[in-house]
Image (tube, grey):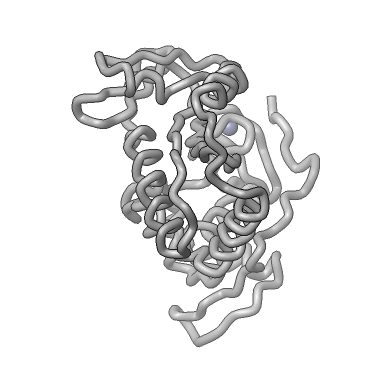
Amino acid sequence: MFTLKYAVILEVKNIVGILEFDDQFHQLIRVTDDGSKEAFSDPVVQVQECRRNLIKWLSKFSFKSIPIIPLVVAANQKSIIKTNSNSRKFKEMIIKSNYLLTKLDLIDSQYNDELLERNEVRRICKNLITKHIEDGYEILNTYGVNENDIKRGIYCLLCNAFNVKRQSDTWICEICKSCNKKGYIQALNDYILLKDNKITNKEFRLFTSTESNRVFHNIALLENLKYEGKGKNSKYILPKNGFSIPKHSLEKTT
Ligand SMILES: [Zn+2]
C-alpha cells in the first residue's frame, strides 16, 4: 500500500490456533486445540525480506526512497497471538486484522512529509502491477522464498488446510469434510501464480502431493488443456490469468 508519505507491506496470514512467533529461531509455531504443534516459516522474516526487495526495486527503477513499514496481519479472528520476543519493534510488527485500521491511522500520524507526488505513486503502482505480471514467474525469487518452503498438497477454500484429496469424481477436505467438484482449481491457480502457466503431470503430482498420474490426466481432459511435447514430458498449458473458481462449488458433506 503506497501513500505520498510512506508504504506499508502487509503479510496476511489466515492461520487458526495459537500462533507463537519465535523471535529467537525465527519460526511461527501453530498450536491447535488438541495440543499438536506445527511450524511455519516466519512471516516476520518474510515481510522484512519483502521490504528489502521493495527498496531494491524502487531504486532499480529510479523511484525515490520512502519509509516502508512491514506488518504481519493475523487475519483469523479465532487465532491467539503469542511471542517470546522482548523486542518492541518485533511486537509492533504483528497485529490482528481487527486492529489494522487503527494501526494504519497510527502509522499515518507518525509521518508528515509528503515525499512522493500523486503521479509518482500512480507510476509506482502501475509499474509494480505490470512488472508483477511480466516477471510473475520469478515471484519466488522476488520474495526470497525457497521452493522447498512451498507447502505441498491441495488447499481447502473453507478451512485453509492442505488436506483436499480426490474421491471418485469429487474432491473432499479430510479436515472439514467439505467437497468440491473442482477442488484442484485452487492448486492450479497457485501453481500459475507461483511458478508457471505450463505444467507436466509429474510437476502437478509433486506440487499437490498426488501419487497417481491418472489424477492430472483426468483434469487435463476435463479442462480441455492443450499441451506441448510428447509423452511424459508433455507440458500442459494453463490459462495465464488462472481459472475462475466456480461459484457454489463448495458444499459440506455432513
Ligand atoms: Zn477444509
Q: Nearer the viewer, residue 206 or 213?
A: 206
Residue 203 visible in the current orientation: yes
Residue 97 visible in the current orientation: no
Q: Position of residue 96 (x, y in %)?
A: 52, 19
Q: Position of residue 92 (x, y in %)?
A: 40, 20
Q: Residue furthest right?
A: 248
Q: Residue furthest front?
A: 113
As drawn, 81 above or below 251: above
Q: Residue at x 45, y 58 (%)?
A: 139
Q: Position of residue 150 (x, y in %)?
A: 39, 49
Question: Which corner quadrant holds the C terminus?
Answer: top right
Q: Position of residue 77 (x, y in %)?
A: 57, 17
Q: Residue at x 62, y 59 (%)?
A: 123
Would residue 147 appear left or right of 111 to someone viewing this image?
left
Q: Nearer the viewer, residue 140 or 69?
A: 69
As drawn, 138 above or below 245: below
Q: Residue furthest left?
A: 24
Q: Residue at x 36, y 13 (%)?
A: 82
Question: How many numbered marks have been drawn onto this rendered protein structure?
Answer: 0
Q: Quadrant of residue 133?
A: bottom right
As drawn, 16 above or below 144: above
Q: Quadrant of ligand 1?
A: top right
Q: Residue at x 59, y 27 (%)?
A: 176
Q: Quadrant of residue 227?
A: bottom right
Would residue 26 appear left or right of 97 to someone viewing this image?
left
